[in-house]
Image (cartoon, rainbow, N blue to C red):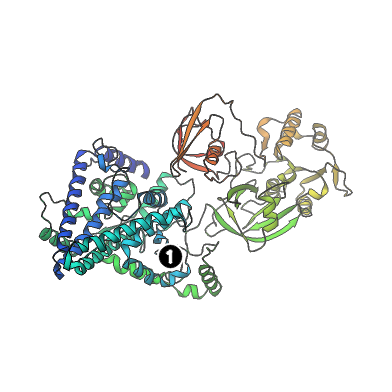
Amino acid sequence: MTTAIAVSADTGLAEELQNLYRTTKAQVGDDDLDHIRNVTAYGQAINARRVELLHDGSPRSVVRAAVLETLYRVMQFSELGHNIIHGSYDDLPNGGEYHSDRYRWDFNVDVDHWKVMHHEGHHPNTNVIGKDHDLGYSVARGMAGQDWFGHHVAQAAIIGGLLAAAPQAAPFFLANVARLVAGKPFLSGYTLRSPAEIATRDAVQRYLREPLTTGANFLPALVANYLGGVGGYSSVLFLVLIEHHAGELEVFADPGPDETPDQYYERQFRATRNFLRSPEVDNYLERVLLEEVPFDNRPDFRIFYGGLDTHIEHHLFPDLPPSKQREIAPAVREIAARHGLPYHETPLLDTLPLIVKTLAGLSIPLGEREYGRPLRLLAQPFSLVRRLAFGAAYKTLPEAPYLGKPRFYNVPVKVLSSKSVAKGQARSVRLQKPHGWDDVQWEAGAFVSVRMEIGGEVLVRQYSLVHDSESSNTMEICIKRVVDGRVSNRLNDELRVGKYVTLVGVPTTSGGLAMRSTPRKSLFIAGGVGITPIIAQLRRIARESAGSDAVLLYFNRDDRSIIFDRELRDLAHRSGIRVLFFTDRPSRRSHIIHDRLSELMIKRHVGDVAERETFVCAPPAMIELAQSALSGLGLPDERFHTESFTAPVLERPVDDGRRYTVHFRRSRSSVEIGSATTLLEAAASAGIRVPTGCERGLCRACVTPKLSGTTQFEADGDQLARITVCNSLPCSDIELDL
C-alpha cells in the first residue's frame, strides 16, 4: 500500500505530485510483476475458452465466445499492453518479457506507431489543439474547440462504418495519428505498410483459420469472431474516447515551451476523466467469466479497466503500473481538492448518451462560444459562411473561432493596416490584438517575434513595437527591407490588410531599452530601423512628461532611409522634444544634417550629455562607437542603455577535442559534436527542424525541453529543464525532447 506523504501548506502542485510519484514508484516490485503475470495467464485462459466455444456452434456459445473475445481485447489494451509499453515494469530486474522493448502485444497495433502517437503526441500534449492528434483520432470532432471540416457533417455515420470494421480499421487509425505526429504523408510506406500487414494477418486468423478448424460450425464461429472483434476494439475506442472528450473536459491552445510543471499537471487534471464502473455491466460480465473460465487465482475485475478507470492517475504518472494507480487514486483526489482542481468522474453508462449527443451536436461548425447556443452563430452569418467555406476546403481559420481560450504562443494576428514608408524601403504594419489579449501590456521598447515558414524552414525575426500598450489598442511594427533578407523582404512584399502573421508570443522587453519611468533628462540615439523602439519611448515621454528634456539623434545613410520622418517632426513640434536628423550623404532638405556620429558631434549638439539617461538602438558597430564617445564625454555606465537589433556572434570556445553525444528522444537519433558546436547546429545535422530567430537566446523561438546533460549555462549552477538550443553548447552528453 502506498505510504501517506506529509504535505506542507505551501507545497506546489508539481512538487506534491512528484513526491507522490517517487514514493509510489519506489514501491513497485515483485508483487506487481506477479500480478501482471497472473493477469496474462488469466487472459490466456479466457482466449483458450473462447476458442473452445467456437466449436460448439450454438447461439449461446456464439454469444459467450463474442463476450470473451471482447473482454480479452479490452484486457490486452488496458491492464496489459497499454501500460506495459509505457514502461511500467522496465525498472524491475526480473521483468523479462514485460519490458516495454520486448513485450509482444496481442493487439492490432504497430508498437512503434503507438509509441509515436501516444507517448510523443498524446501524453505531452494532452488536449492541446493542433498537437494532440488523439483528439477525435484525426477523424471525429469530439470537442467544440476542435476545427470543423466538411466530413464532420456525417461523422456519426463515418464512425459507425469504421466501428463495423474496427479490428481491421484500428491499426490504420493509429498509424494515421502517428504519421501526423511524425510529419509523414498518408500515402507512404510508413503509414500504410505495417497496418495492412496487421489487418490482413488478423483477418486471416479470425475469419478463416479459426472458423475452418470448427468444421460444420464455420459460419457461427465466423460470426462469433466478428462480433467479438468489433465488440472488443469498439469498447476500447469508446473507453479511451470518453477519457478526453465531451462534457466538462477542456481543450487548450498550445502553451509553448514556457509551460511550467504546475501548469502541465493542471492541464492533465482539466483534460482527463475517470469513469465510474457500472455494477449492472460488471455483474453480467463477471457471471460469464465465472461460468465459462475456471481459474484458481482470479484477479479483480478492475483489470479490464486498468489505466482507464484511473486515467487521471495514468496521465499524471504514465509509467506506474495500473495496480499502483488504483492504490494512489484517493491521494490524487485529495491533491486535486487541495489545489482547487477538478477530479472528473462520470458513471460509465452516462457517458454513452453524452458522447452520442456531442458527436451529433459538433457535426455542425459550432465553437466553444456557441455550443449549446447555436443561435449565436446564426447571428453571425459572415462567420458561419467563412467556417463552412474553410472547413469544406479543409483549411484552418487563422482567427481560430472554435477555441474559446486565448492563445499566447504561435498566434496568428490580423493585419489592420499596412503602408509603405521611407519611399518603399520599409512597411508600417498595424496588428490587431488577438482574442484574450485585453490585459496584455508592454513597455516602450518592447518587441514581438514574428514566425514564418519559408521553404520548409521555420524562421523567427524580432520587430520593435512603436507604441507602448498604454497609448494603443493595437500593435504596430515597422519592417525595414534588408539586403538578402529572407523574412523582412517577404513581409514587405506580402503583408496587406486582412492577411495574418504569426507571433511567437506576447510582446517582450529584453531589458536593455526598458524605460520603467520617464527620466527628467534623456538622450536617444537611433540608427536606421533602430528608431522603432525609440519612437515608442519618445511617444511615452510626450504623453506623460511634458516638461521632460529629451533629445533624439537619428542617423541614416540618406534621406530616403528615414523612417517616421513626419511623425518625429510632429512629435517634436507638439512636445518640445528636440529631434535631429543626420545622414551620411548630403541632403537638400533643410532639417537634415550631413554628419556622422562622433564624440565631437555629440558634444556640439548635447553639451550636458553626462547628466542624461541615454538609450541607444542601432547596429552593433554604431552602439560601440556611441558608447565610446559617450564615455569620453563623462556619461556614467549605469546611464547607458542599449539594445541591438542585430544578433551578436556567439562566443564559442576553442574546440578542445572533447566529443559529446546529443540524443534526440522523439526523433530517435543521435549525433556526436564538439564543445564549440551549438545544440541547434547538432539538430540541423540530424535533419531535425527547430524554429530559429535571434540566435542569441532572447526570442525563445528555439526553447526545447532538456531531459539530461549539462550546457555551458549550467556548468556552475542549477540544471535547466528548458534551454535555448541556438546558443547552448554542450558540457556533457545531452538528451533533448526533439
Name the residue nearer the viewer: 547 or 498: 498
* Residue placed under numbered mark 1 in the picture: 144
Left or right for 232, reference 297: right
Residue toward you, 186 or 602: 186
Question: Disc 1 residue type?
Answer: Ala
Residue 144's spot in the image, x, y percent?
43, 65
Which of the two residues, 429 or 114, is positioned nearer the viewer here?
114
Residue 113 vs residue 76: left or right?
right
Q: Is residue 217 above or below residue 545?
A: below
Between 183 and 353, the one lying in front of the other is: 183
Residue 296 at x, y percent in the picture: 10, 50
676 versus 112 height, above or below: above
Residue at (48, 67) in percent of width and height: 149
- 689 lies left or right of 174: right
Judged from the image, the secondary structure of the residue bearing numbered disc 1 is loop
Q: How many marks?
A: 1
Quadrant assignment, res 370? bottom left
Residue 52 vs 721, above or below: the answer is: below
At a point 34% along the width and 41% down the height, the residue shown is 18
Rendering coords of residue 454 (x, y %): 61, 52
Visible residue check, residue 127: no
Q: Is residue 487 left or right of residue 240?
A: right
Determine which quarter of the picture holds residue 438.
bottom right
Q: Quadrant of the N terminus?
A: top left
Instruction: Specify the farthest residue to the right.
Output: 588
- Say whether residue 303 is visible: yes
Q: Position of residue 236 (x, y in %)?
A: 29, 59
Q: Badge 1: few (under 14), some or many (20 or more) residues near its Cα, within 10 Å?
A: many
